């Protein structure tokens, strides 16, 4: 299996290198009167950490174990219907293995205009619309930094948060003063039956497996033209059911999540200010005495200022997250789980810079100073006794796109 | 402590939503937004061109996909255009476009090297929209958006 993945990865890389000298104009063409186009990117990171590992063995040494490769395309089936997809490969230390997967493959349809509202839908494997950045979190050119603020866009449950099968309906109103959209989605998460998602829901990887039930999401986005302000509010519900293995110490329980997300973006050229808040109410029921029924309130918040000058972008960010808002120091959770208290929170100061060498090549560098290991990748730091509360990370990344 | 966090968030939010002008009015722009003479400009609002270039809208009122045609982000003319029309730096604008493209919500903008290519490409591709200097002669197949 690993060999097949490796061959497929190489094939994707060759395809990328073959197409990368093309200009955007040449990657868009007409089939009849319908445009189609393809595009892609490749990135390579170098990480150096102190006290803990991040994406490979980076504690005290440089790890090159972070690379991303994507190849996508758009095809207009009819003037109102478009097929869009992206193949993605991501290698990230012990947390991701470079296997090629379908990031999204969807049918985008434009329906009618009703009292000025344009109605549209997306059907298939779609990106989960969470916050301002989740839909393209694996595309370096769309991220404001190498690592997204982990309080909200945590990588510990990324497979669960990336994409899902289902349908999203959207209504959009454009006026002279503002831009408003309302969308509703019904989705079944596909990245749920894996050790990292199970650890997120249930603390560790247990013998049985999780299955996802259909979830629902509603989202409102409003942009005011005069002030350059974008406000987004979102509410979602999700449920995962546990199917015990033949001999299992857990019963068939369920975990229900209610997600509240608020985002605000303010453009003050040449500055962009962004802040987002997330609260997840997580209820666990019916797992038996090993995992007693419980409810906890995960919380994350960050504020970020970006400055752009010609080809250079710089940012400063503060990012904080708690596994349980009622136990910010992690003391009670530490007692219940026999893990260190700093496993249940993280406060991260980050500053970084990006330089666009050309339109398609950029170099980024950022520094993190973190108190807590709340979102530290467990897979890269398996021994809890070796995890340190205070740690540093210097990350650099080269990104090429076409 | 919980109250303190929410008070801090509320303060930041209020500071951010205070009305502030974002820059030069689009009407003073040294550019005009152009489309092909194929009927896509019917029933559109005066700020449709700006909304198209910010990808706040990705389709024409009749449902056709919008195809943006732009100069490279490294081109000084593109800098003047995005600053005037979108109040963003070119790379900021490009980042936001790619968020729509890589989530399957929009076509990727076509990058051309000069205004001659811009006019040719807009004329050739259905649903394409580009821009030209306000005083430049307008090639026959193109129309200016209101």
Image (tube, coloured by chain):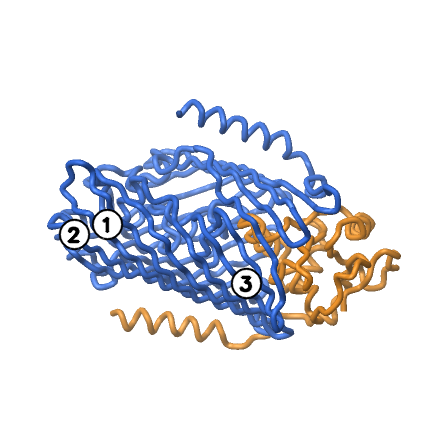
Chain colours: A blue, B orange
- Measuring from the top left, give residue A12's x and y in whole percent: 54, 30
Q: Are marks 2 and 3 in contact (CB under 8 Å)?
A: no
Res A312 seen here: no
Disc 1, SS: helix
Residue A146 marker: none
Q: Would you name the residue on which mark 3 appears?
A: A271
Q: Would you name the residue on which mark 1 appears?
A: A343
Quadrant of the image for the C terminus of chain A?
Answer: top right
Residue located 47% across and 45% down the image: A138
Label 2 marks a residue whose chain is A
Mark 1 or mark 2: name the one nearer the start of the chain.
2
- Measuring from the top left, give residue A331's x and y in whole percent: 16, 56
Residue located 31% across and 69% down the image: B5
Residues at marks 1 and 2 on the same chain:
yes
Q: Is residue A125 above or below residue B51?
A: above
Residue located 12% across and 52% down the image: A335
Label 3 marks a residue whose chain is A
Find residue A400 and report its image quarter.
top right
Q: Would you name the residue on which mark 2 appears?
A: A334
Nearer the observer, A54 or A142 = A142
Question: Can you tell which of label 2 and label 3 is closer to the viewer?
Answer: 2
Label 2 environment density (alpha carbons within 10 Å; few <14, some 14–19, many ≥20): some
């Amino acid at each position: 299996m690993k060999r097949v993945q490796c061959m497929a990865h190489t094939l994707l890389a060759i395809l990328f290198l073959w197409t990368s000298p093309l200009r955007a104009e040449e990657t868009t063409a007409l089939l009849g009167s319908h445009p189609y186009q393809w595009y892609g990117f490749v990135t390579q990171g170098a990480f150096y950490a102190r006290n803990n590992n991040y994406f490979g063995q980076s504690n005290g040494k440089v790890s090159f174990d972070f690379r991303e490769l994507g190849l996508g395309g758009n095809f207009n089936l009819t003037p109102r219907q478009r097929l869009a997809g992206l193949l993605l490969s991501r290698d990230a230390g012990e947390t991701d293995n470079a296997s090629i997967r379908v990031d999204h493959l969807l049918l985008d349809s434009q329906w009618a205009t009703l009292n000025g509202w344009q109605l549209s839908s997306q059907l298939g494997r779609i990106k989960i619309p969470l916050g301002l950045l989740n839909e393209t979190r694996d595309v370096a050119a769309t991220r404001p930094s190498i690592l997204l603020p982990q309080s909200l866009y945590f990588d510990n449950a990324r497979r669960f948060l990336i994409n899902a099968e289902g349908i999203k309906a959207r209504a959009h109103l454009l006026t002279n003063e503002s831009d408003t959209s309302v969308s509703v989605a019904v989705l079944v998460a596909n990245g749920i039956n894996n050790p990292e998602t199970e650890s997120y829901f249930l603390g560790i990887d247990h013998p049985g497996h999780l299955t996802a039930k259909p979830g629902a999401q509603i989202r409102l986005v409003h942009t005011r033209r005069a002030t350059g302000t974008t406000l987004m509010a979102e509410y979602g519900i999700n449920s995962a059911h546990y199917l015990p293995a033949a001999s299992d110490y857990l019963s068939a329980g369920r975990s229900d999540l209610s997600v509240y997300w608020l985002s605000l973006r303010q453009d003050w050229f040449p500055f962009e200010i962004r802040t987002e808040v997330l609260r997840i109410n997580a209820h666990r029921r019916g797992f038996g005495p090993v995992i007693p029924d419980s409810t906890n309130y995960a919380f994350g918040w960050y504020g970020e200022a970006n400055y752009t000058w010609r080809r250079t972008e710089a940012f400063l960010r503060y990012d904080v997250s708690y596994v349980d808002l009622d136990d910010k120091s992690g003391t009670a959770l530490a007692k219940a789980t026999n893990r260190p208290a700093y496993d249940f929170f993280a406060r991260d100061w980050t500053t970084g810079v990006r330089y666009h060498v050309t339109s398609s090549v950029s170099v980024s560098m950022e520094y993190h100073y973190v108190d807590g290991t709340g979102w530290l990748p467990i897979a890269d730091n398996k021994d809890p006794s070796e995890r340190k509360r205070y740690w540093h990370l210097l990350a650099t990344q080269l990104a090429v796109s076409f | 402590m919980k109250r303190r966090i929410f008070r801090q968030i509320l303060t930041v939010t209020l500071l951010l939503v205070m009305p502030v002008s974002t820059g030069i009015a689009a009407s003073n722009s040294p550019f005009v937004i152009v489309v092909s003479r194929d009927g896509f400009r019917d029933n559109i609002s005066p700020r449709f061109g700006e909304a198209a270039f910010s990808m706040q809208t990705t389709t024409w009122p009749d449902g056709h996909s919008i195809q943006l045609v732009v100069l490279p982000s490294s081109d000084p003319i593109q800098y003047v255009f995005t600053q005037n029309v979108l109040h963003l730096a070119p790379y900021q604008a490009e980042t936001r476009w790619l968020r729509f493209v890589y989530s399957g919500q929009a076509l990727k903008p076509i990058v051309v090297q000069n205004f001659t290519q811009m006019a040719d490409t807009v004329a050739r591709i259905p649903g394409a929209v580009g821009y030209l200097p306000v005083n430049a002669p307008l090639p026959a197949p193109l129309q200016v958006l209101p």
